[in-house]
Image (cartoon, rainbow, N blue to C red):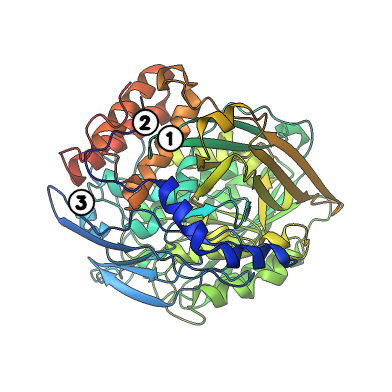
Amino acid sequence: MASPTHNQPHTSTTAVIRNLRAEHLLLTNSYRAGTNRTMSDVTVGMRTTTVTTTAIALVATMTLAAGCGGDSNSDHQSSSQSSSHGNVIKGGHHDNDQDGGRGDAYQEDGGGSGDPAAGLANPEAGAAEDDRALAVAPDNPYGEPEPEPEPDVFNGYGYRNFVDTQVDPLSTFALDVDTGSYSYTRAALNQQVLPDPGVVRPEEFINAFRYDYPAPKRGLGITIDGAPSPFTLDNAIIRIGVSAADMTPTERPPVALTFVIDTSGSMAGPERLGLVKRSLAYLVESLNPNDTVAIVTYESDSGIVLNPTPIRHANRILTAIDRLEAGGSTNLEAGLEEGYRLAAESFRRDGINRVIIASDGMANVGITDSDALATMIRDEADDGIQLVTLGYGLGGYNDVTMEQVADQGDGFYAYIDTMDEARKLFGEQLTSTLVTVALDAKIQVEFDPEIVLAYRLIGYENRAIADSDFRNDQVDAGEIGAGHQVTALYEVTFIDEQTRLIHDSLGQVSLRWQNPDTRKVTEITKAIDPPPVTTAWRDIEEEITLAVTVGAFAEVLRHNPYAANLALTDIARTADELATLYHSPEIDEFADLVSIAEELYYTDSRIDNAWDD
């Protein structure tokens, strides 16, 4: 693989930034005179992109806007909703920079790719293969056909622009171990439907794969390496890997789990409540005899199906799960309140306390706003009851609620589309799912302006933290489980190659977190060694290539103009090569997904040989 060649006029990042520096000289000086760092986004290659597919036309209008502002940590609030091909994208307003609030950087009009519900005309198809679905759906308790599903709801967070290091060399964000975006995309592609760009979050694609990071003995550790950039000639990719100390199953404390299960009418079907029942039954079978499980269900209202029961009485738990049926409206508020109340009553001071929500995220009774629901559970998370959200279903799915509620609940968000995903989450990753080793984990990257001209963080748009809040331990950040990994990719532009070669470091990475038991704060720092920018792709380690390839796939799917020089044809070829090298079911599956997307998306390469050796 090599950096992309260009068959069309392209304004260089360096030229744009140098022109911008002259225009913003006074602003830069005033920023540096202040106590808080601020940041200005650099607009590169403004364009409107139109992509045709074999099945439907995708038209995405992308607007980049450079702007400056105060050092405010404004969350990415949804300012509008737009319906596109049956999906709803909440978004438009994107606080793009890492300093927490600079103004709109990306707004997408349209950009939908088809209603995923269209792929569910025959949900039982292939049920016998790979345990992907139950063969028979539960009977509708009303004896009538289910209504058409509501539109899917996604949040279009946009993307980050290049940042001039002389304006702001600092990039700060909360760590995130969610993987729901990748799993949802897999489910959509397996139904021959392209995912809506609003659901594609590159960090959740990249973090869906494990890498060979050394695990620290305690707390968190940092691994830094790099590779050439596939997006822009002469740029580099800096990969920052964060790994958490692992824990054996015998070291794990006892757990008290409270399942909050959506049994509303929209959850009927083998790929929804049917898969919920099978995946939770698998979790029960993976727990220890002294662990406990309680079950709350909600539809129009909520109710307790099973009080806290030790796993040694597993048959009682499995029977309660098996008897669940779908019907009624969706009162998520009532389910959350009941679940947290029961979890508080059965709180284990010697163990781990979790509420696990299994739902499609659609709420139509009680509090239905995702922000209000997230705020409602903040106090419960502070009291030591953490939340895991498990998403199910295509068509009538609310990605926004499932992600935001998990973030506020000091937990994580996963999407389960197959029993294979359930086995991974509740089998090999069970300890990571249940045991938290770092609270409010955040990262700050500082680039040396004498070497690095500009940088952009790929993903994490909704995890921004103000640079000045890095050491503010009252600011909520991310939670990391035992053995979890987090990966961040930066694309960087250098002042020039000669300057880069005579320096030993491009900057430094700082990591800060709290111990969940003692609340003691730890901060560690590591230098960024120069990456092998001029090395051919064939000489780069396979796992770095994997991370970059997965990130590039996400960038193309979400129509990021910085990936306009990449073609899915080239990404598919690289994915196939990785599958051959790894002999891994996960990498094989990734290669298949890229091939499906290529067939659905477009067949001609916009830039030939973009990833060739």
Tell me how far mark 2 sits from mark 3, CA to CA: 43 Å
In the picture of the structure, the residue carrying the numbered disc 3 is 122
In the picture of the structure, the residue carrying the numbered disc 1 is 229
Q: Position of residue 287 (x, y in %)?
A: 65, 41
Nearest-to-viewer mark from 3 and 1: 1
Residue 221 in view in this figure: no
Q: Amino acid at mark 3?
A: Asn
In primary-sequence order, the first of circles 2 and 3 is 2
Please report contact status of discs 1 and 2: CB closer than 8 Å, yes or no: yes
> Residue at position x 61%, y 56% from top?
168
Judge the density around disc 1: few (<14), some (14-19), many (≥20) Cα neighbours within 10 Å: many
Q: Is residue 491 above or below residue 407?
A: above
Q: Amino acid at mark 2?
A: Ser
In the picture of the structure, the residue carrying the numbered disc 2 is 3
Quadrant for the N terminus, please.
Answer: top left
Q: Position of residue 293 (x, y in %)?
A: 65, 53
Q: Amino acid at mark 1?
A: Ser
In primary-sequence order, the first of circles 1 and 2 is 2
